[in-house]
Amino acid sequence: MTQPCTYHWHLEKTPTGRIQCAECQTHITEIPSFVDIGHDVFIRPTMHSKTCALREEGPGGYLVLHFTAEGRGCEGTVPTCKACGGDRAWDVVGEGPTLTLSPSILCGATIPDHAGGFHGFIQNGKWVQA
Ligand SMILES: [Zn+2]
Ligand SMILES: [Zn+2]
Ligand SMILES: [Zn+2]
């Protein structure tokens, strides 16, 4: 693991609770666009598809970053644009501190130490465990 890090793709939570890039140890608060929504869950806006008619209208969805029991980062994308996210697009109300998405978010990753699942809601800009 001596590869230089440019993009901070691989995030981890250390045993001391620090959330950082696993390669260069940059703290998550120094990585642009991640928003801390509590419970060690972070979101960042995602783009629309290139041809989406609504691509100027705010984000196309959110990437939701959370951590397994062993501290490995796990990410999933939650589309919120009905035009390019299709039927699976979440309903969205507000943004920033009023961001509320429905229905709930359930991580589908099958990581061994992820048993028990990761399931909750984003309500008023905060993660609420289901
Ligand atoms: Zn990095
Ligand atoms: Zn997960
Ligand atoms: Zn779109």
Image: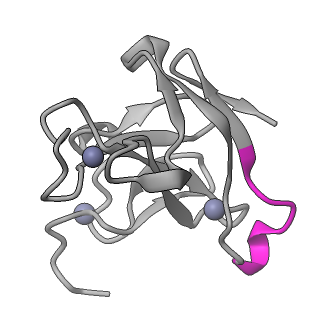
Residue at image coords 14%, 68%: 6
- Residue in view at x 73 percent, y 61 percent: 69
35 in relation to 2, above or below: above
* Count of all numbered marks drawn on residues in the image: 0
Image-based side of 50 in relation to 39, left or right: left
The colour scheme of the drawn protein is one colour
Q: Quadrant of the C terminus?
A: top right
Q: Which quadrant holds residue 55?
A: top left
Where 64 falls versus 112 (above or below)?
Answer: above
The one nearer the camera, 55 or 120, is 55
| Residue drawn at 67 percent across, 37 percent down | 103
Q: Residue at x 49, y 47 (%)?
A: 89
- Give yes or no for residue 121 being in the magenta stretch: no
Ligand 2's quadrant is bottom right
Would you identify the image quadrant in which residue 86 lies?
A: bottom left
Q: For this rendering, which residue is in front, 26 or 83?
A: 83
Q: Position of residue 30 (x, y in %)?
A: 24, 40
Task: Give residue 121's position: percent from left, percent from top.
Answer: 67, 33
Tell me residue 67's x, y (percent).
60, 56
Q: Is residue 99 shown left or right of residue 50?
A: right
Q: Is residue 86 left or right of residue 21?
A: right
> Given the current orientation, which residue lies at the most extreme right position?
116
Residue 51 spot, x, y in % from top left: 13, 57
Which part of the image, by quadrant, shows the N terminus? Answer: bottom left
Instruction: Read off the magenta span.
Output: 111-119
57 above or below 55?
above
Of the pair 118 and 28, the residue shown nearer to us: 118
